[in-house]
Image (tube, rainbow, N blue to C red):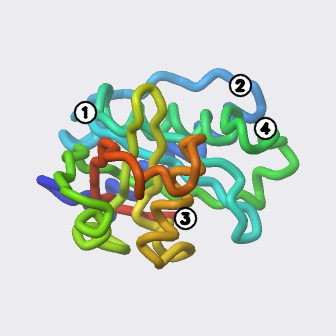
Amino acid sequence: MSEYLSEQEKKILLHMAREALERGVRGETLPPVDQTTLTPVLRSEGASFITLTEGGQLRGCIGALQPYQPLAEDVREHAIAAALQDYRFPPVQPNELSKIEIEVSRLTVPKALDYTSPEDLLAKLRPGLDGVILRDGFRKATFLPQVWEKIPDKAGFMDQLCAKMGTAHDLWRHKHLEVLVYQVEEFHE
């Protein structure tokens, strides 16, 4: 990451995510962002994932792997999407809002990870540091670096990521897949 966010920038993004979440769940229109009030980092293109939890349990997680819009806009868009469009969960309801906690993950640009074998792939993965993207043709899946806390075993991590991608859990052991890695700057309410 070329430049880390200041504590104030993190607070602004969390506030924007909370406002977007609450307005989105209530079906209210989100006011436009006054770009003149934002720092250069918040106005520059950035990719984020928004993770929603309720009582410590995942309630929604959606984001972008590549930057395509200002970071502030990306956070707002994905806060709403995590609440209303994560296919794994029913949409967040207004009576849940006070129980939802928001985590923002700002991503670096993903880089291809060159490897020669399944063993070499495992050797090159950095648990706790690397988010991993797997691609197999049109299929794609990612785990944020925070997932290592729940799946610390490298082989188990790859198995679960293949399953998330919709393939056999051990596909990575038998087929050379496109693997990209990225890091995140994570903060939460």
* SS category of the residue bearing label 3: loop
Q: Image quadrant of residue 128?
A: bottom left
Choose the circle earlier in sequence order: 2 or 4: 2
Residue receiving disc 1: 45
Choose the circle earlier in sequence order: 1 or 4: 1
Task: Tell me the kind of residue under disc 3.
Answer: Glu
How many angstroms separate mark 3 from mark 1 (CA)?
Answer: 23 Å
* SS category of the residue bearing label 4: loop
Q: Tell me, for residue 91, which label it has, or none.
A: 4
Residue receiving disc 2: 28
Q: Which percent across, then down, holds residue 115?
A: 20, 56
Q: Mark 1 touching mark 4, by CB under 8 A?
A: no
Identify which residue is drawn at 50% across, 43% down. 16
Q: Tell me, for residue 189, which label it has, or none.
A: 3
Mark 1 or 2, closer to the camera? 1
Choose the circle earlier in sequence order: 3 or 1: 1
| Nearer-the-camera pick, 178 or 46 | 178
- Tell me: residue 153, above or below residue 141: below
